[in-house]
């Protein structure tokens, strides 16, 4: 008999351990069907035994629900619950270990075989679980990669949309640039024509300037020759003036000599007055000599004017600076 104060641990077929619990709690778990037929129990987590071999747990019933298919050993309360709930077939059989353990030995042997098959299945399941875990990890990795790819696709889509908008804007700018280029080419052609016209005009102006320079050179030559002629004329005029001044001086000397009174011998002759005409009487001797001098000066002036006319009035004005 087990000690009622002893604490126990329960290990199911999955290897999970429950406890510590008392014996009453363990018996209650057996009646509720929570203890599997091949569950292990231990009080020190080192030494384990089958729960069905513990007499105080009363796990001495075996159910043959189908021919050759057994479940147990389990408690009678579990069998009653299955009957009430309809979980057993109509042709099921119930066995109790009352043949000095013979039935239990067969059940245990079959159960051992089932346990071995279960262990194999468990190992296979664990391998499959490992594969499943690897597959799940791979799936999670693939999911994360897919999420990353989806995020990358979304970002790429945004970039594509941005690129498309940029492309449209670039196309618009290119069209504007082409229009500006065409306008610029037209303007360049117009300016080129203007430049050609300006070049032609410049060539004409250069030709005109060259002609003007030639004319200017000719004018300079004419001016130089004219200056030389003017200088010669001034020299000639100065000489002529000197000669005329000398002549005028001689004439003035002659006039002075003529104007001076001369001693004459006068013979008095009495003449009777005779009225010839009604005109004024003849001038006196003083008037005669004054008019004679004036006549001499007028003759000199006429002679000088004729000489000036011969020399040229224009050259004389230039000579005098008028």
Image (cartoon, grey):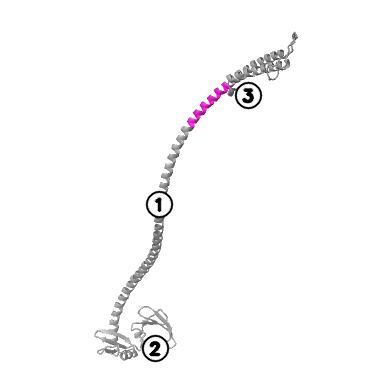
From the image, tell me which residue sits under label 1: 179
Q: Which residues are magenta?
A: 209-230
From the image, tell me which residue sits under label 2: 28
- x and y percentages locating residue 100 in the rendered image: 29, 89
Residue 314, magenta (yes or no): no
- 3 or 2: tag closer to the N-terminus: 2
Mark 3, Cα crowd under 10 Å, few <14 / some 14-19 / many 20+, is few
Report the disc number at residue 135. none
Q: Residue at the spot x=38%, y=66% of the render? A: 150
- 1 or 3: tag closer to the N-terminus: 1
Image position of 248 (left or right of 224): right
Figure quadrant of the N terminus: bottom left
Q: Considering the whole magenta stretch, tell me its main secondary structure.
A: helix
- x and y percentages locating residue 110 in the rendered image: 28, 82
Observer-nearest of 46 and 290: 290
Q: Nearer the viewer, mark 1 or mark 3?
A: 3
- x and y percentages locating residue 257 in the rendered image: 71, 12
- x and y percentages locating residue 74 in the rendered image: 33, 87
Observer-nearest of 159 and 234: 234
Report the disc number at residue 320. 3
């Amino acid at each position: 008999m087990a000690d009622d104060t002893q604490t126990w641990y329960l290990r199911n077929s999955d290897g999970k351990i429950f406890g510590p619990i008392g014996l009453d709690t363990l018996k209650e778990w057996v009646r509720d069907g929570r203890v599997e037929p091949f569950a292990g129990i231990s009080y020190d987590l080192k030494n384990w035994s089958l729960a069905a071999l513990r007499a105080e747990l009363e796990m001495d019933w075996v159910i043959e629900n189908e021919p050759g298919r057994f479940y147990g050993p389990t408690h009678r309360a579990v069998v009653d619950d299955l009957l009430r709930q309809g979980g057993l077939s109509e042709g099921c059989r119930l066995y109790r270990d009352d043949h000095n353990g013979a039935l239990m030995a067969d059940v245990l042997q079959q159960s051992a075989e089932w346990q071995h098959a279960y262990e194999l299945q468990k190992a296979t399941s664990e391998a499959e679980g490992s594969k499943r875990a690897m597959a799940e990890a791979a799936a999670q990795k693939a999911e994360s990669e897919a999420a990353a790819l989806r995020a990358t696709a979304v970002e790429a889509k945004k970039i594509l949309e941005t690129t498309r908008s940029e492309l449209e804007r670039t196309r618009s700018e290119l069209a504007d640039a082409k229009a500006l280029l065409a306008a610029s080419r037209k303007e360049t052609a117009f300016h080129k024509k203007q430049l050609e016209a300006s070049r032609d005009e410049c060539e004409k102006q250069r030709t005109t300037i060259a002609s003007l320079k030639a004319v200017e050179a000719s004018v300079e030559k004419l001016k130089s020759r004219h200056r030389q002629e003017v200088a010669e004329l001034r020299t000639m005029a100065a000489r002529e003036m000197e000669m005329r001044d000398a002549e005028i001086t001689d004439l003035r000397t002659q006039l002075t000599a003529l104007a001076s009174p001369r001693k004459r011998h006068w013979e008095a002759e009495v003449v009777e007055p005779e009225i010839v005409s009604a005109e004024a009487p003849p001038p006196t001797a003083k008037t005669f000599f004054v008019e004679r001098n004036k006549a001499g000066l007028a003759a000199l002036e006429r002679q000088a004017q004729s000489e000036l006319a011969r020399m040229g009035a224009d050259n004389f004005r230039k000579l005098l600076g008028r």
